[in-house]
Amino acid sequence: MANSKFEYVRNFETADLLLPNTWIVVRVDGRGFTKMCAKYGFEKPNDRRALDLMNTAAKVVVTELPEITIAYGVSDEYSKLVSTVVSTFTANYVYFWSTHFPDTPLSPPLPSFDGRAVCYPSVQNLRDYMSWRQADCHINNLYNTCFWSLIQLGGLDNKEAESTLAYQRTLAADKNEILFSRFSINYNNEPEIYRKGSVIFRDYELVDPNSHNTMLTIDSQAEPIEQSKSQKEKDKKSRAKARVVVEHMDIIKDDFWNQRPWLLSNKPGKFPKQT
Amino acid sequence: MANSKFEYVRNFETADLLLPNTWIVVRVDGRGFTKMCAKYGFEKPNDRRALDLMNTAAKVVVTELPEITIAYGVSDEYSKLVSTVVSTFTANYVYFWSTHFPDTPLSPPLPSFDGRAVCYPSVQNLRDYMSWRQADCHINNLYNTCFWSLIQLGGLDNKEAESTLAYQRTLAADKNEILFSRFSINYNNEPEIYRKGSVIFRDYELVDPNSHNTMLTIDSQAEPIEQSKSQKEKDKKSRAKARVVVEHMDIIKDDFWNQRPWLLSNKPGKFPKQT
Amino acid sequence: MANSKFEYVRNFETADLLLPNTWIVVRVDGRGFTKMCAKYGFEKPNDRRALDLMNTAAKVVVTELPEITIAYGVSDEYSKLVSTVVSTFTANYVYFWSTHFPDTPLSPPLPSFDGRAVCYPSVQNLRDYMSWRQADCHINNLYNTCFWSLIQLGGLDNKEAESTLAYQRTLAADKNEILFSRFSINYNNEPEIYRKGSVIFRDYELVDPNSHNTMLTIDSQAEPIEQSKSQKEKDKKSRAKARVVVEHMDIIKDDFWNQRPWLLSNKPGKFPKQT
Amino acid sequence: MANSKFEYVRNFETADLLLPNTWIVVRVDGRGFTKMCAKYGFEKPNDRRALDLMNTAAKVVVTELPEITIAYGVSDEYSKLVSTVVSTFTANYVYFWSTHFPDTPLSPPLPSFDGRAVCYPSVQNLRDYMSWRQADCHINNLYNTCFWSLIQLGGLDNKEAESTLAYQRTLAADKNEILFSRFSINYNNEPEIYRKGSVIFRDYELVDPNSHNTMLTIDSQAEPIEQSKSQKEKDKKSRAKARVVVEHMDIIKDDFWNQRPWLLSNKPGKFPKQT
């Protein structure tokens, strides 16, 4: 049959695997979003509708792909994992566009995204990655808030705003001072979604971190890769039942993680008692 | 600054490169499409609207990503390339859904896709890959046409249809015979889009393969990886101007390739003279 | 210059990296050693000279490549690391051959080896890998001791010995019984080098695992990837001074690891007090 | 059995494959050879004994690993291939040391090597790689011959020699002039092994490149990956019978390759007629 003669081309598919027992982070980036911000008139420095749309799409990804969200111990094909996340994100971004931008119809070329996956071997590496992103969010947002205040409220042009801020590049305190003295803006009163970013996770009953040594528990439970099949089924149902929430909180300090041991233990939490 | 302490996590991003000077094929697959076919009532064995929607989305990918379509010599990050193609495809699939299914609104969970990239070192490997896909398309469609005729026209149930065809598994002639004798269907009169699949490419003036040795030209031009910058600009403009077409033709035989030397030579063709 | 025209070929060198902060195991295997055992008349089931030669070569690898032995946190090019270990091992194997086989000169084709590297993300994964190897060593050696006793002492031929053992494949107790009842061999009195394999490491003062929680210390110390430069220098000197030993002990139980916290903590131990 | 509990660690072995139908080049480098040159008093700028020893070891690699030398179409595990080549090279380097350095016994730490493999998709890429190496060899050797002449014959110290040559960095003609005018050395009369490096290959009857279009033949024969088993056996025997030679010739021009079509066609040549 003709088929067999050509089928040798299958040998060119090189394996493309992620290391098991590591924390897999899939990072999704907008493609050419500077252009898109202009096309659809996104507000500067932050457009709440655009952020809400991103969170809506991300929330669906977490909801629809439970085996990815709690990634510890998952092994999968790299590009299949990445493209599945990116495709689900994109589909929901386009679909929910009109909900968040009711007066701005989408038109070709449509928004699109790319992605990549990184493996982190330890809990500390993963938390440092999350901390890095949140620290970055803070630094960028403080800069952008200053930059656009100088332009929108202070009447400066782009270059003037840039050089005002370049002069005092590394000093967060000075930027706070500019905002307060020139524009009476207290940066700490800015919405948390802008200052801290968004973290999306399944919500269970919070744990009191002082009641016992949470991290120790996590370490000892993280090791067994194998889980009984019935336990897996139970956990899957528990995850399907859990509420997926979008929060804007400090994820650098221990509190966030200690109160939510299910995030790093690969075990669902308890459901809050009904009242 | 807090930033620097966490930034070491960048070291975990392992490189993920495609071999230069090879033909990169990005394969896009629907995720869970059996379920989706049922949900939206796709027709069996082929739903023309669903195929047209796929082709519409694919055509946009070819149109918007010219540097990918003619992939020879392109080197890029694996997962970024794959996720860009999949994301662009998904965005257009969701966006153009209502054009092809005006009476069937889309609802969550939305259709999504995954992808992977494979590198083929030689023209022959690439053509064998394409031939493999078209041979596969023919084999599957002949089987499916028989299978659904036995059910829809012959009144058999799934199992009966399966066993009827299993008995004569490898014989294409027998399947043609079943279609003709039982249902008066001449398989060769079935639409080409079902029998041959779709191939999407930029269209230029066809070349007479007998006028000169096309393949030799291609081989000798394929080698130089470097191209002058102004030539690149010219080629880019030429590609942007070219019409992207969706065709259903034989791509196993040499004719298709010999008449369209631009497909394998990494050089745009000539525009047809205006009349 | 001619050089620049060709230098583009450098782009074909794809990156080939090991994930940081993981335990890298480089496994070295003899190539075609069945043939070599026959050529040089190695004794069955174990040739003490051949094992000692392997250990001599391995000891030099550990001694000469201190940054590899304690691999935690090391990132390096995959194939360079593997080929360096294999080359150092091979050079010493050939060089010290005459020490261990004074009456059997080496002749072409010379013994050679191949290797591969695997990354293990957690201490438990690494210990499970080591346990797997030692469990395998035990199972194989018990089988081989039986097999060759049946032949050398029991007068059976290869096939008879094989079928005797195949009949009771999975039962370790039965093999012990065969050795004892037929040949008065108490397997537990066989040399430990055959029963447990060899483990080669830097030796420091043993630690009493009951005096404090060793594993906890290890976990908390394993995280910081960065070390001050002067500390690195100190550690390097300490490792250079330490004695490299070849031992044959149980590495599946906790004792071995708890008494030698330097093996998993990436910190040299204390030198024993001189007396 | 204890074994099964630990065996899951096998999942950490990530695949590590070379792209099929490409030319695989394995590059072997000496580790710390500056130190070794000093330790054993290698002559500057070229030590003939050291080069001959390298060629002896390389010749054994080509002789013992016929499936690697003509690499076209071979697919194999990356690190296994690299480590096999490096190990065979190292074993022979240590073993034949005393043949080439009868008065200089080897002593620990022994010479060792590392390696890496690169895939080149086309004949042109491969030839460009070889040309790059030979061009590099010429440039380096001309520089080194000048440098050491200025020191050994001209009485300059290292710094003076360096600055003399830095001044006229890119000009080959000037270096030729220095050698001739100051030291009456005609660079073109220097031994070819120094000026052109060494190329090691199986030798068959040369082909007259004018008798037919050799390159065309090669191209068309290179495609079929599959070969009949009996043909493979024949080819293997032919390769085992062929003489492996060490030559120092121009491999940048077409002549070398056109006269030896067996090098790029993956087919053994003809044996010269006996006289």
Image (spheres, coloured by chain):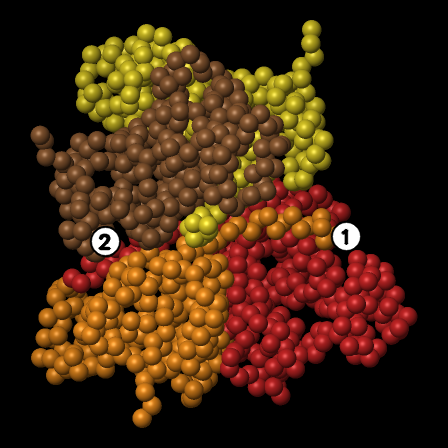
Chain colours: A red, B orange, C yellow, D brown
Question: Residue B5: x and y, percent?
Answer: 71, 48
Q: Nearer the viewer, residue A239 or B170?
A: B170
Query: Which chain letter matches label 2?
Result: D
Kindly identify the residue that appears in the image at 24 percent across and 47 percent down: D258
Question: Mark 2 falls on what kind of element?
Answer: helix
Q: Which residue is mark 1?
A: B1
Q: Which mark is residue D215?
A: 2
- Quadrant for the C terminus of chain C in the image: top right
Would residue B63 be found to the left or right of residue A6 on screen?
right
Residue at mark 2 to residue at mark 1: CA–CA distance: 62 Å
Q: Nearer the viewer, residue D98 or B163?
A: D98
Above or below for D139 versus A244: above
- Residue C199 can be seen in this image: no
Kindly identify the residue that appears in the image at 51 percent across and 32 percent down: D182
Kindly identify the residue that appears in the image at 86 percent across and 62 percent down: A174
Q: Amino acid type of disc 1?
A: Met
Q: Which mark is residue B199?
A: none
Kindly identify the residue that appears in the image at 65 percent across and 23 percent down: C237
Question: Residue C208: x and y, percent?
Answer: 66, 21
Q: Amino acid type of disc 2?
A: Met
Question: Mark 1 falls on what kind of element?
Answer: loop
